[in-house]
Amino acid sequence: MIEAQAEAVLRETDGAPFVLLGHSSGGLLAHEVAARLESTGVFPDAVVLLDIYSHDRDAAVALQPGLSAGMDERSAGQVPVDDTRLLAMGAYFRLFGQWRPKEVKTPTLLVRAGERLFDWSRDGDWRSYWQLPHTALDVPGNHFTMMEEHAGTTARAVADWLAD
């Protein structure tokens, strides 16, 4: 999957500068594609991780009820919750449950939702985190609404960081 995405990025960008961005589990894919590309001497301008949790099994388990409820609320929307989407989500949790990211040279931005989506039962911060070097920004909304009614604010935060 990572190899196919890396090849697609190379084909579509054709040598032009590019940024890899992913929301939730998609952020982990974006990071892994960056690592794969770096191993071939191709360096993205940045990797943007939007409210990721899947790399932390405990957080992923805590997040699951909130994700399910949020997806149920949105099931009639633009991205319906169907068997394919549920299977893909389960596959991401299995793939990334024990995964540990490789350090990359590409600058990385972690954009965290400012509102809690789920009950946090552990000590410490409930927000998304990334253990490798990065810059973190908090934006309004929860895991879903940061990409819906707060999408403009989220996009501006990313664009401002990229401009810097």
Image: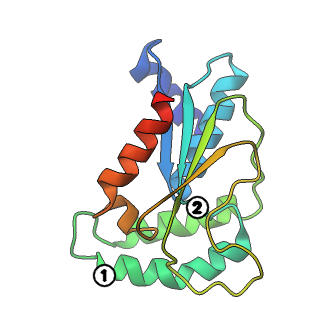
User: How far separated are the C-alphas under marks 1 and 2?
Assistant: 21 Å
Which percent across, then down, holds residue 60? 63, 73
Residue occupied by mark 2: 92
Structural crowding at the residue carrying mark 2, measured as other residues with C-alpha within 10 Å and reported as few (<14), some (14–19) or many (≥20): some
Q: Residue 61 is drawn in which quadrant?
A: bottom right
Is 106 situated above or below 88? Answer: above
Foreground pick, 24 / 139: 139
Foreground pick, 146 / 43: 146
Looking at the rendered structure, the kind of residue marked 1 is Glu
Foreground pick, 77 / 86: 77
Q: Residue 76 is drawn in which quadrant?
A: bottom left
Which percent across, then down, holds residue 158? 45, 42
At mark 2, the secondary structure is helix
Is 99 situated above or below 72? Answer: above
Is 139 situated above or below 69? Answer: above
Looking at the rendered structure, the kind of residue marked 2 is Tyr
Residue occupied by mark 1: 73
At mark 1, the secondary structure is helix
Can you see residue 97?
Answer: yes
Q: Residue 125 is drawn in which quadrant?
A: bottom right
